[in-house]
Every structure is written in structure tokens, then in C-alpha cells.
Amino acid sequence: MSEFLLEILAEEIPAGVIGTARKDLLQGVAKGLAAERINGTFFTYSTSRRLVLVAKDLPEMQDDAVLDVVGPPLSAALDKEGNWTKAAEGFARSQGVDLGTLTVTTTPKGKYVVARKTIEGRPTTDILADILPPVIEKMTFPRMMRWGDGRYNWVRPVHSIVALFDGLVVPLTVFGVESSRTTMGHRTLSKARLIITGVEDYFAKLRLHHVEPDFIERRRVLQEKAESLAGEAGGVPAHAGGLVETWADLVEIPGLVCGSFDPAFLALPEEVLVTSMREHQKVLPVRSAEGTMAPFFLAVSDHTTDPKGLIVQGNEWVLEARFADAKFFFEEDLRKPLEDRLEFLSHLQFQEKLGDYRAKTERLENLSDILASQLGKEDQAVWALRAARLLKTDLVTSMVREFTDLQGVMGGIYARYQGETDEVWQAIYDQYLPASAEDGLPRGDVGAITALADRIDTLTGLFGLGLVPTGSKDPYALRRAGLGVVRILLEKGWRLDLRRACEAAFALHGSLPREAEEALSELYDFLIERLRFLLDKRGFKYDEIQAVLTTDCGDVTDALDRVTAVAAIRSQEDFVPLSLAFKRIQNILVQAGGEIPEEPVPGLMSEDAERQLASDFFQAKFMLDMLNEKRKYQEALRIMASLGPSLDRFFKEVMVMVDDEAVRNNRLSLLRAMRDNFSRVARFNEIQA
């Protein structure tokens, strides 16, 4: 078995796309080879300038293929005497086979002549030369670059291609660059041209010339250096949150330096300092042993040393300039109360057809008041109204215009500085939580109410415009907004009629192009799908979820309680017969169709089994009503399961679909009453027994 090495050497590739590019390259090459009946073991590596693929256990030759080619119908290939015709001779000649080797096959269209031919395998090097250029040239990135005369379009200009199969060059051309066995070491630490003879030789020479091609190794070294340098400064590195991975993709050799800044800047809010360092400068803050911010930072370097301190000095200059800007913005913003910024929201558009942020603020105030009432949180309404009024005002501050990642956060900070209550400033600060399925929730009830109002306002408005997510496209992040709504309700344990809440929000928009009934029905289904996703993440089985979500689930917290009850009781011995009986009831009612009386009449019941079932059910119904009202669903399910023997006897002894229409409808009415009562918890026909 053979090995193959591919290296694409280019200008510096943006760190954010390298991981995806590695996966795309591996999948493209592996899929292309598999289509040619060649399999192997594939590995990818990368640096800020290189994408590398190594394949091991490749065959030298492609396997031969046996191909059956269908030719003319047998009626045209044989004459009346059973001899081959001119048509058969021409077919055999065109396929390069002897006439005597033709066979006959039967197809849906009749009998046809078949030529079996063997296609000899090609050298793997020839196949690699065919598939690699299109795989590489068709790779896509969020931002592409053209170079030369404009013909070539890739993430960055390509300088060289190394393609070696068992040490021999695979001749191919990518973006006008011919493959070879030559690459370069580190751009500044080693300008030598490296002649590569194979995979091991490639890795050894790169490392000798100051290039570490293994992303995992660079990340490990950077993490160790971060802990060491921060310790020398008397602290610890702040939580990295993916920054070390970004560092590893920014360099070819893992270097790190520790710099400092004027301690006076520590007077700025920590959120401002951290955002400026991590998001804008890609440097990591250092914290003291007590967890407070220290006047030090860690910065990645594509060098192993910094003997003259120029790398540290450059990072310090840029960072202090950013801090100085942030200090100016912060002090200027504090001069104007958030209340005075409301008027400027009318100049900031929320959405073309939904108006500006001043109009959105008015809707949020009204909706927060409505939600507080619907949730039984009237005592929080005054704070929810105040928070909703100031919720979006930081969008017109200088700090948020410069540091857009801090929207919401800066509003909360300014509100705290300006004397707003804890309920209000925390609600503003936390308004975008949860931003994912893993994020925490807003602090306190006021924050949760305004976060719900913000998301429901956005969802109803955009669904009212018909701007519904399709496929992978979700430009307004509505899936995230819907997930946030459901998560807040579930984790707060709040009972809210989603339909009623969305109807109120829809009405606050005034005139929208879509009819309310159509838009809200689609939005309800959309939110239920978010609920399905969260229930699945909690480990419930598909049929347990389906049994509940096919009922009315406008109250998502109630739906969670019901799924929990179904999951808890389904393993009990008497639950399976109940599930099967429910399916039988459902099938009978579907087949019956037509009008069924609302209530069964005892006087029309003639069979003992029929009367027994009706008696047991109506006795149980009182308890079911009480237990369902108190949301004691497990107990309700046990009572339902206790009806199993009566149901079983009924189906054994009673014919439902009798000729007597009155008797038939009376029995159907009893079964429907049972189904509708049971369906208040779940539709058991969805349970896979």
C-alpha cells in the first residue's frame, strides 16, 4: 500500500475558515477517490499558510471493474434461425467484445442482449491528477480573492503545490501552479526552499525550518505557554473561550508574548476591556489569583522569541489606543441619560416594513405589560415596563457603534451607573440571553419577561411579513429567537398560552401583509418544532415526544410535564395494553367518520361489557379531570391504564360497527369520549409498543 502527500501553500488564510477548509479538502478527496473505487486512510493538517492532506494505505492501481452494457432487444439481435444479426455484431464491435460472449438478460421491457466487459484499473497517480484540481479549485469560502489576471478565485493566492505519491511527483496544475516536490519553510525564520521526498521527510523538514504543521500540537503548546507566562505575571489566563484555537490557526509556529497596559484603564467596565482585547485584538486577558482583571495580556506571535520586545511593544501600542478610545466613548455616553436617547431610536431602522426602533420600543412596553399579566407577574410589571422602555437605547451610544458585540451589555452598565434598579439594569444587560441552547437565562423575572417580549415581537412581525426561515437560510436568526422563547418558559417553569401571547404581539404591529390566522398558525408550528428539539436534547424518545406534540401544546411547560409523565409510565406492565387499545379506538373512529353524538346514552347500552366500560370510564373521568387540572399527569395515566381490562373485555365481547345506527353511534360516542379524555395528556397511538 502507498502513501500520498498534498500541500497547498498560499498567502495567510483567515483563521476562521481553516478548520472548515481542512474538512472540505478531506471530504472532497476521499469522496473523489471512493467514486473511483479507491479507499484509504486520510489525515489533514494546516497552518496559517498551508492546507495539507496525507493519505495512507492507498493501492497503486485502481481495481478492475466488470461492467454489463445492455444492447439491442433480443428480437433484433437474433434472426429466425437463431443467428446473430448485424445489430448484434455492431453492438459487440462497439463494446470491444467477441460476438460469442454476448448474453441475454430479462428486463421489465423484455429480453435484451448484454455485453460483459472488463475495464482495467488505472494507476492511482492518474486518478489523483484528475480529481485533485477540481476538488481544490471548487472549494468555497465566505470571502474569496482573485489574483493575477483575475481568472483564479480562491481564499488566498496559491504559491505552490506539493503532490507526492510514494515520493514521486503527481503531475497536476492548480490555478496555473504546477505540482512539484518543493515547498518553503517559515516566511521569516527560514527562507530555505525545501526538497521533499515523502511524508515523514515533509514533517521533519518543516519542523526543522520553524513550521509546526499539526494544529493540535500548536494549540497544546500555546495553552502551556499561556499558563506559564500568566503565572510569571502573577496571575492566570482568563477563560479562553476558543481564542487558543484561533491563535493556533493564526500562526505557523506557536509563539506567545506577555504585555502590559496602564492600570488606570482597569477603571473601565471589565466587559469593555475583555471585548476590546479578545474580539478586536485577539489577545487574552490575565486575571489575578482572586479573579479580578490584571493589567497584563497574552498575545500570539508567529515567532518563538521576541528578543527586542518589538512584538510586545506593537501589541501594547494598539491595545492602549483601543482602550483610550473606549474610555472616551464611555465617558461621553454617560453624559446623556438613556431616557434622553429614546428620540434617537426613531432614526435607527429595525426592519424596513416593521418600522424603527422607537416603534419597536413602544411595542415592547405594551407587550411586556401584557406578558406580565398573562404570566401572573403583575407585581413585576412596573419594572418590566421600565426595562422595555430603555431596552434598545444603547444602540445609539458611541460605545456600541464601535463595539457592536456589547449591545445590551452596555445598556445594562449605563443603566446601573445612572441609578436604575437591579431588576431594570439586569434585564437590559441580559436581553439577548439565551443566545444558544447552552447559554444561561436572563437574571430575574423582569429580564425573562422583556426577553420574551423582544423575541415574540420579532417573530410575530417577521412571520406577519412572510419572512419565514427556509432550509438553512435564517437571516433574521428566527430559529434562535424561537429557541429562546421556549427555553425561557421551560426553565422558568412558566405557564403561558403561546397562541394568546403571539396574538397580542401580532395585534401590536398594526397592519401586516399576512392574515393573522395564517401567520400565527405557521409561527405556532415553528415554536413547537423548537420545543421538539429541546425535548430531544433532554433525552426523551421520539414517540414520547410525538404523543404529546400532536395534542395542544400552546403551554410548553405543561407539554414538558406530560412528556415526562409518559416517559415515566410507559415501562409499566399495564401501559402497553392501554396504548394498543387507544390505537384500536383511533382506527375505529377514523374508519367510522360521519357525525357522532356528543355524549353516550346509557339506555342504548345492551351488553354487559359495554355498560361495565362506560361505568368504569365515567367514574374515572371525575378523577382524571381533577388530576389533569392539577397537572398530576403520572397519576392520571395510571388511572387510564387501570381501564385496560374493561377495554380489553369490551373489544372481545362487543361489536362496535353494528347495523343499528343508534347503537353503533352510541358505542362510537363512548369511544370518542375516552379518546378525547386520554388525549388531554397524550395520543397513545403514537407510542411504539
Image (cartoon, rainbow, N blue to C red):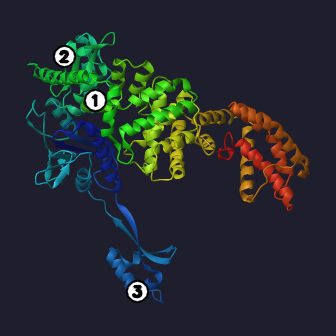
Residue 325: mark in rendering:
none
Neighbourhood count class around disc 2 (C-alpha, 10 Å): few under 14, some 14–19, many 20 upward: some
Neighbourhood count class around disc 3 (C-alpha, 10 Å): few under 14, some 14–19, many 20 upward: some
Q: Nearer the viewer, residue 248 or 292?
A: 292
* Picture residue at 87% right of the left edge, 51% below the top: 653
Query: Which SS class for mark 2?
Result: loop
Mark 1 vs mark 3, foreground winner is 1
Q: Contact (CB < 8 A) between labels 1 and 2?
A: no
Query: Which SS class for mark 3?
Result: loop
First in sequence: mark 3 vs mark 2: 3
Is residue 350 depicted above or below 439 in this figure?
below
Kindly identify the amino acid type of the residue bearing the numbered disc 1.
Thr
Mark 1–mark 2 distance (CA, rounded to whole Å): 25 Å
Is residue 26 depicted above or below 191 in this figure?
below
What residue did someone put label 3 on? 85
Mark 3–mark 2 distance (CA, rounded to whole Å): 93 Å
Residue 643: x and y in percent read 80, 39
Q: Contact (CB < 8 A) between labels 3 and 2?
A: no
Task: Find the residue positioned furthest to the bottom.
Answer: 80
Q: Quadrant of the C terminus?
A: top right
43 left or right of 168 in image: right
Is residue 141 depicted above or below 296 in this figure?
below
Query: Which SS class for mark 1?
Result: loop
* Picture residue at 10% right of the left edge, 51% below the top: 148
* Residue 440 visible, this orientation: no
185 left or right of 588 in image: left
309 left or right of 671 in image: left
What residue did someone put label 1 on? 397
* Residue 157 visible, this orientation: yes
Residue 261: mark in rendering:
2
